[in-house]
Image (cartoon, helix red, strand yellow):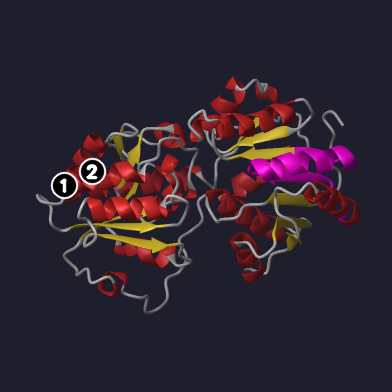
Amino acid sequence: MKNAKISNDKILIIDLAKRFGGAEVRVQDTATLLAQRGVPYAVAVLNDSPLHRRLDAAGLTALPVPYLRSDPRTAIFLARAIRRGEFSVVDAHNVQSQFWGFWATKITRVPMVATVHSAYRLEHGGSRKGMAYEAVLKLLNTTDTRFIAVSEAVETYLRNTGIPATKIALIHNSLRPPAESPADPPDFRRQLGWGDDAWIMAVVARLEPVKGIAHLLDALATVRDTHPRLRLLIIGDGRERTALETQTQALGLTEIVHFAGFRNDVATILPQCNAFCLPSLSEGLPYALLEAAAQKLPLLVSAVGGMATLLEDRRTATFAPPADSTALADGLRWLMDNPARAAELGTAAYRLVNEKFNPDDMIRRVLAVYRGSDELRVTNSE
């Protein structure tokens, strides 16, 4: 199957995520763009997962997998789906999808693409889990699998893992235009009892240790007395939520921090905020960052991964080293104390992402990888 060319596009995307995050946004965007171009596709998802429900609501084609993602029958189910649907290529997102996609494509001898959204080993702190996830990438590298990296940092990670540059395409996430707000959007500030004078920092992320939110809470505790207008809105859910809520109580922050959980109306909430923070310890190029930039929100982010590559400190964002609550506190103070400069950063980030992350360009490049283009190593510098 080496350098196989795909003459009749029919794409099976696999995303067996239990939660909805940035990878799932990209999957939904890719499915939408394929549908708009009349390219046949389906998205294999866990039955009744958040992604499954979102695809159904958007009128996109979902293929529900009736097994747990730890069940080996998943590979057989996917192989049968590939044969029945006569799919010409498989694009697998997240490590479980890539593992079962590997076996399904081995059975069916269909070309495979692995879209990688993060540095697996680094994201999991070099743990056994992270090493096991990285082993899946190495397994894929023994075949003719082609890899899509969503950021320069992920591309570098894949190359350091031993994957040749000739097998990797750098294709950034695309920026979707902000959804049109309802004519009378809910007043989220007043729902929370926060008035017009509140200065709201928003976080949109999975509540996992790698997102670094515990360090932001520590920073908040050192800033609140001198900046009483400060509020923190955390949108998202995950395994660390209980620990973060406990930390919030221990720091006496319950009056100024709100955990909103998973929300479908983020596009109506972000415009009611004053800034956006993503204090991650490791990161690819998160959709949440692009969505915040689309709203011209000033950004306070860790200088890691795709965020550090894309943005510039005090030009398009305010940087803090990872796991540094003191630097995060300094960033919070600076944004609040310098509203005009902060607004300039938000506008500069908006212009940058609006120019760089074009959906039509993304899908054109993704299709080139699906088709086994000889010019595989596509970059965003074209």
Q: Can residue 306 be seen in the rendering of this structure?
A: yes
Q: Which contiguous range is marked in magenta? A: 85-112
Q: According to the image, label 2 marks what residue?
A: 219
Question: Which quadrant of the figure contains the N terminus?
Answer: top right
Q: Nearer the viewer, residue 313 or 53?
A: 53
What is the crowding at mark 2: few (fewer than 14 residues within 10 Å), some, or many (at least 20)? many
Q: Is residue 87 magenta?
A: yes
Q: According to the image, label 1 marks what residue?
A: 223
Q: Quadrant of residue 149?
A: top right
Q: Identify the residue shown where x is 84% and y is 46%.
A: 88
Q: Identify the residue shown where x is 49% and y is 49%.
A: 287
The residue type indicated by label 2 comes to Ala
Q: CA distance from mark 2 to mark 1?
A: 7 Å
Q: Can residue 381 be seen in the rendering of this structure?
A: no
Horizontal and vertical percent position of residue 245: 33, 55
Q: Quadrant of residue 371?
A: top right
Q: Nearer the viewer, residue 19 or 90?
A: 19
